[in-house]
Amino acid sequence: MSEQAGNPATTPVRESAGTEPGGETGGGTGGEERRRPALSPSRAADFKQCPLLYRFRAVDRLPEAPSPAALRGTLVHAVLERLFDLPAAERVQARAKGLVGAVWAEIAAEAPEIVAAVLADLRRAGEDPDLPGPEDPLPGWLASAESLLDTYFALEDPRSVEPQSRELLVETELSSGVPLRGYLDRLDVDGEGGLRIVDYKTGAAPREAAEARALFQMKFYALALLELRGAVPEQLRLVYLGAGGEELTYRPEAGELRRFQRILEAIWAAIREADRTGDFRPRRGPGCGWCAHRGLCPAWDGSPPPYPGWPELRTAHEGATAKPRPGGAVAGAAGVGSRAEAGAAGPAHGDAHGHGASSAA
Ligand code: SF4
């Protein structure tokens, strides 16, 4: 059973599964409001890595094209979500692999320009080590997605799992006023009400720094659920599908989540101070190698656009966007991109969480 450790001084806001109208910075749909920025694991990581990168993504909301690995992550996440739409007995390996083509067809139909760009990337670079050759990259690329699903089935039998939620939006505000927003891949609840957060990673199990980043993400979700449900999740489970597969399970405690809360509050305070001054400093580092915005970065002899100011609620015609829902129909070209862009300024782990670039913007 989960520890009951809610903070009565805070204000639960909501949870909801699937697409949230106007919820993100991805593809646009008409008539919704655009949300104010909130803190998500990806945006917090962006700010820690480079404040200017945060600005480009969360404030300027500049588009970023997904990498092939990131788009594959989107595809695999979508297939895994679809899999749990099926009755338990039908969640078998062949069925999952059969979904790859159908989900890919939807992505290709709804975001043809992004798909074309990714395939062109593959042809140009032959960068994906899973591919047999750059001539016709698509079959091999899809096969590499199927291979990740094989690994998933080696780690878990989905017939034995009945998730309470998939692609669950968790959105709340801490007592200090810090807005939190993120998407959980999966939430399981055991017979006694214990919560388990599950996150799929389509890359290999990480080294120390990347593991810390993954754990940061999971603690973020755990804290959000603690706020919303008053219970500490019993398990934070990372399922790595790359390089043969591996699982990492962490059991958080209320005290550490409250200490983690103070870290988030400090990050948010630094973000708002940067907004007040308009001073989002570039911070050069290894991540610059994957940054989509180097051309605009003064650390690389570029010039950023004038600071546009903190995004407030706007209507759709002013730029509102909708969250892509990787398990459902892909919500449009920008939706595919936004799920993928979470990894755009880092190595191509292929963990293109839609909870990422879009979720805190
Ligand atoms: S190129 Fe590097 S320093 Fe510049 S915005 Fe991107 S991550 Fe930051």
Image (cartoon, rainbow, N blue to C red):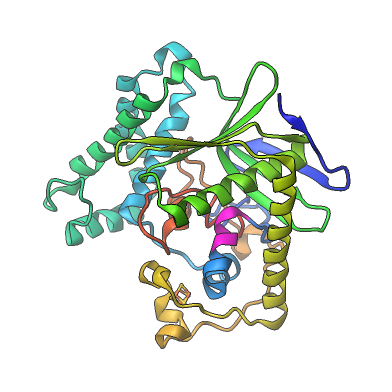
Which quadrant is the N terminus positioned in? top right
Question: Percent from the top left, x then y, of residue 109?
Answer: 35, 44
Numbered marks: total: 0
Question: Percent from the top left, x then y, of residue 278?
Answer: 66, 81
Tell me if residue 174 can be seen. Answer: yes
Question: Percent from the top left, x then y, of residue 16?
Answer: 66, 37
Q: Is residue 171 left or right of residue 94?
A: right
Which quadrant is the C terminus positioned in? bottom right
In which quadrant of the rendered view does residue 230 lie?
Answer: top right
> From what the image shows, is residue 61 above or below residue 1?
below
Depth check: give the residue in front, 258 or 88: 258
> From what the image shows, is residue 147 above or below residue 38?
above
> From what the image shows, is residue 34 above or below residue 286?
above
Q: Is residue 210 left or right of residue 258?
A: left
Q: Residue 41: say if magenta.
A: yes
Q: Main secondary structure of the magenta part?
A: helix
Q: Is residue 311 left or right of residue 81?
A: right
Q: Residue at x 60, y 69 (%)?
A: 59
Question: Percent from the top left, x then y, of residue 134?
Answer: 14, 53
Q: Is residue 193 left or right of residue 50?
A: right
Q: Residue at x 32, y 21 (%)?
A: 93
Tell me if residue 21 can be seen. Answer: no
Magenta span covers which residues? 40-45
Q: Residue at x 40, y 80 (%)?
A: 295
Q: Residue 173: say if magenta.
A: no
Q: Residue at x 88, y 42 (%)?
A: 8
